[in-house]
Image: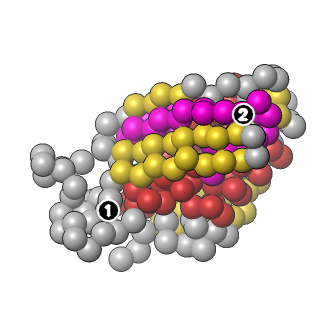
Amino acid sequence: MSRQAHNTRTTKETEIFVSLDLDGTGVCTADTGVGFFDHMLEGFAKHGLFDLDVTVKGDLNIDDHHTIEDTGIVLGETILKAIGDKKGIKRYGSCILPMDESLVLCAVDLSGRPYYSSDLRFVFEKIGDMNTNMIKEFFYALSYSARMNLHFKQLSGDNDHHVAEAAFKAFAKALDSATLIDPRITDVLSTKGTI
């Protein structure tokens, strides 16, 4: 069963291509024009063992908002497409991930119902060339386009780089767990019969 998908989105603000293999080895090519965001996508792919290719041409002459938010939309749609009918997947995944002084919990439910909750806190306006408020916008857009519940809890941490990196890696581990096939699950994991 192939769990690969690709997706494109073209607007007046961005041109985006995303390719994803849920059963990959962590190979990533990320070229968004925002260096720190590329670094976070690379960490997401490596620690989730996803093969990921992301290419974005955005209106960075304005700021990084459209580039990052729209990438979240397209990556979420691509995740949803790659998962397919959800038969046999574990559906839920979580991870508490340490990154030096930071400790971030991420929990995912591939429920078909979008919801986003986060208490991630950042001290500074930017990490490298990325606005820290775009981390929320990215995950919010991704959770809604992938139709998943996505929760973050920051248990500790005061270094913005570490908090952000812990969040992206925790999400990777939680999503990897939620998308794993369990041979005991013969249909979808729901009393409703659909997710």
Residue farthest along the left direction in this orientation: 192
Residue 14 visible in the displayed image: no
Please give left or right for residue 85 compared with residue 68 in the image: left
Please give left or right for residue 28 compared with residue 89 in the image: right
- Colour scheme: secondary structure
Q: Is residue 98 above or below residue 83?
A: above
Image position, residue 166 (x, y; %): 67, 45
Q: Residue 154 occupies which quadrant of the picture?
A: top right
The amino acid on which the numbered mark 1 sits, given as a three-letter code, is Ile
Q: Is residue 165 above or below residue 49?
A: above
Query: In terms of secondary structure, where does tag 2 sit?
Result: loop
15 or 183: nearer the eye?
183
16 or 29: nearer the eye?
29
The amino acid on which the numbered mark 2 sits, given as a three-letter code, is Gly
* Residue holding disc 2: 157
Residue at 68 percent across and 52 percent down: it is 41
Q: Is residue 11 above or below residue 122?
A: below
Residue at 42 percent across and 52 percent down: it is 93
Query: In terms of secondary structure, where does tag 1 sit?
Result: loop
| Crowdedness near tag 2: few (<14), some (14–19) or many (≥20) residues, C-alpha within 10 Å | many
The image quadrant where one finds the N terminus is bottom left
| Crowdedness near tag 1: few (<14), some (14–19) or many (≥20) residues, C-alpha within 10 Å | many
Image position, residue 109 (x, y; %): 36, 45
Residues drawn in magenta: 140-169
* Residue holding disc 1: 89
159 or 87: nearer the eye?
159
Residue farthest along the bottom direction in this orientation: 1
Q: Is residue 157 above or below residue 195?
A: above
Q: Is residue 152 magenta?
A: yes
Nearer-N-terminus badge (1/2): 1
Mark 1 and mark 2: span between their CA atoms?
Answer: 32 Å
Q: Nearer the viewer, mark 1 or mark 2?
A: 2
